[in-house]
Amino acid sequence: MTDPLDTTSDRRPGGRTARVRAQVLDAVRAELAERGHEGLTMEGVAARAGVHRATVYRRWRDVGGLLVDVIAAAGEIDWQPPDTGSLRGDLTALNQEIQESLLVRPSFAVALMAASFHSEQAARAQTQLWNDRYDQCEILVERALTRGELPAQHTDARGLLIAATAPLYHQLVLLRADPDPRLPERAALAAVLAAAAGAFHIGRDESMR
Amino acid sequence: MTDPLDTTSDRRPGGRTARVRAQVLDAVRAELAERGHEGLTMEGVAARAGVHRATVYRRWRDVGGLLVDVIAAAGEIDWQPPDTGSLRGDLTALNQEIQESLLVRPSFAVALMAASFHSEQAARAQTQLWNDRYDQCEILVERALTRGELPAQHTDARGLLIAATAPLYHQLVLLRADPDPRLPERAALAAVLAAAAGAFHIGRDESMR
């Protein structure tokens, strides 16, 4: 007989399975951030999580499995894109979130990018997560169109979102520039002005030829 | 007595020192591209270059030294930014060069970025190289101002160049998107339209508050 209030049950959300997963993924994030991808081992994660090595091997198999699951867990967070009332405000707020995630030390986001250069599995999971996030953000562009902030043509929402956010990753991750507190707003503004001028109209390339 | 025509002399450009360096750096590039940063060893480079291990250790000391020198050598190439007659054309041509360097397989450029996540020395050398290249490209913006393609205000040339090029790195390196042959021109166009609308005026942030 199972006790419906028994939170140690293996089968319910919040039960033992979920608790072990949370402990292991917390350990993965901490190890990744502290030691980087090269320092991530099944043994280190098991020890840090206080979970049997055999459990970690059985459930996650190898370091690639841990990376994929930690990225999947990031995708399970109930993240919502900003809603500030203007496209410029929304993109600025989004860029501020990105900037924070890239500047915090140690940065889980940067550790994940580094890992994805070395693990095909991690790279695929990260691409999927990023695609999901950009899909979620397309509503920012839809709202801007509804508010009349952009010309009422078919807009390449993804292209606009990439233009707005890419300078953050480029400056902070690849160029390792000193953080600039105005960068989130500046990059957002450039994308909004380009969009207002029709840079992301679908079909524009064709019509200009 | 030294023979002035002796090209094996250690002291003249094109002499033995330069030849050994060229062989070793060719080997570093090939090993990096084929095996990535984790596969780069002093022994592997020496064997591939056909140079004594002792020479490689004496001159480059460790893998970090090899990475720094291969990046320095990239900076010594007599690279010139494009000059097509328009800012949009110049930025498109620049983006096409970037896209090619990121898509060629194996890609030395991508291997270097991966390495810079793991080697502080490589990261610093890469940042320096990129800063030099962006400095060189500022002439594109100066020419556009002279031609009257941009409003005659003080322009943040670096910000404009980052906006134009960042989407290439973001899409191809971090998001691992399928290559889009129109991306170089689209990213260039978005930056030009943003610039024409004043996105990169220095002092703009202040005046809008």
Image (spheres, coloured by chain):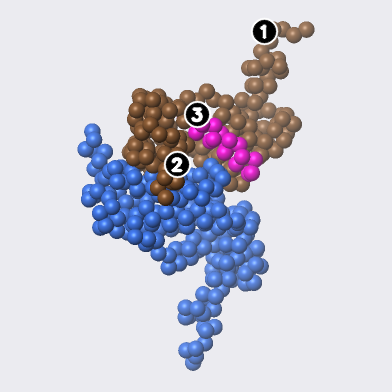
Chain colours: A blue, B brown
Label 1 vs label 2: CA separation? 59 Å
Q: Report the disc number at residue B203.
A: 2
Q: Residue at x 54, y 48 (%)?
A: A179
Mark 2 lies on a secondary structure that is loop
* Percent of width and height locating residue A65: 52, 61
Residue drawn at x 42%, y 39% is B201
Residue B131 forms part of the magenta stretch: yes
Callout 2: few (<14), some (14-19), or many (20+) C-alpha neighbours within 10 Å? Answer: few
Total marks placed? 3
Residues rendered magenta in the picture: B119-137
Q: At label 3, which amino acid type do we have?
A: Gln
Residue type at the position of mark 2: Gly
Q: Name the residue tied to disc 1.
A: B5
Residue A202 at x, y percent in the picture: 26, 45
Q: Residue furthest bottom?
A: A1
- For label 1, the SS is loop
